[in-house]
Structure formats: structure tokens, C-alpha cells
Image: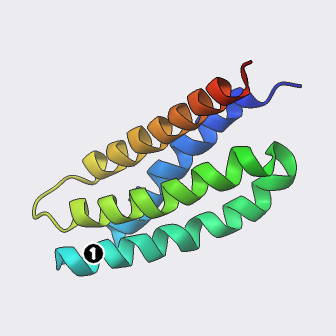
Amino acid sequence: MNLKIADFFIATFTGGFVALVVFLFHPTNMALAMVQGGLIGMAIVLPLKLLLMPIFGAFEVAIPLGIIGMGVGMTAGMLSAIPDISGYTVIAWGDCAGLLVAIIIYDSNKHLTQS
């Protein structure tokens, strides 16, 4: 069974979910928001990694989710600190960033495994 398409859905969902949770905390200071967002992102993806690794494999889950948790968490935190920004904008950023991470990792894996 080929589960590679699930990697893109998992990454997109995780990016949007991390961005949503970080946005709900409404940080005010941008530097504090970046640190807080990174910590929240790492805390969210840890249980997801443990849940999804036996099903989809460690490489396909641990590496992308680690990058998404930290990267989206930090950037969503900084975006959330901007006054009058919409939550939909922050969530869309998380979705796009998660999908982009999945595409980059898929492409690099395909490039490295071709002979």
C-alpha cells in the first residue's frame, strides 16, 4: 500500500493545526511570541510523531513534523503578534508552510534515492 500521498495531508494538517493553536494564545511581544510559538509547536508535534510513526514510518513523519512544529510555530507566533491580523491568514500560512516542507522533503528524498 502506497501511503506517500498521506505525507502531504499530514504535513498540511499539522501546519494548520500548529498555526491555529499558536494564534489562539494571542501573544503581544514579537520576540516572546516567536519563542512561545516554537515551544507550542514542538509540544503539539511530539504526540503526533509518536502516534503516526508506526503507521507511516519514521523518516516520513519525524523529520517533516519536527521542521513544521518549530518553523510554523515560530512564524505563526510572530504573525499572531501583528495587530489586526486574521486567524485565517495565520492558518493559511501554516497550511502552506506544512505543504511546502512535505514537498521539499519528498523531492529531496526522490532525488537522493534515484541512481
- Percent x, y of residue 42: 54, 70
Taking the spot 87% from the left edge, 53% from the top edge, the residue there is 54
Measuring from the top left, give residue 78's x and y in whole percent.
24, 65
Amino acid type, mark 1:
Ala
- Image coords of residue 57 (percent x, y): 81, 47
Hey, which quadrant is residue 37 in on the image?
bottom left
Quadrant occupied by the C terminus:
top right
**Residue where numbered disc 1 is placed:** 33
- Taking the spot 51% from the left edge, 55% from the top edge, the residue there is 67
Q: How many marks?
A: 1
Closest to the observer, 83 or 37: 37
| Horizontal side, residue 15 vs residue 55: left or right | left
- Horizontal and vertical percent position of residue 23: 33, 64
- Left or right? Give the position of 94 relative to 4: left
Q: Secondary structure at mark 1?
A: helix
Q: Residues within 10 Å of mark 1 (few under 14, many from 20)?
A: many
Q: Which residue is at 33% across, 45% downward?
A: 93
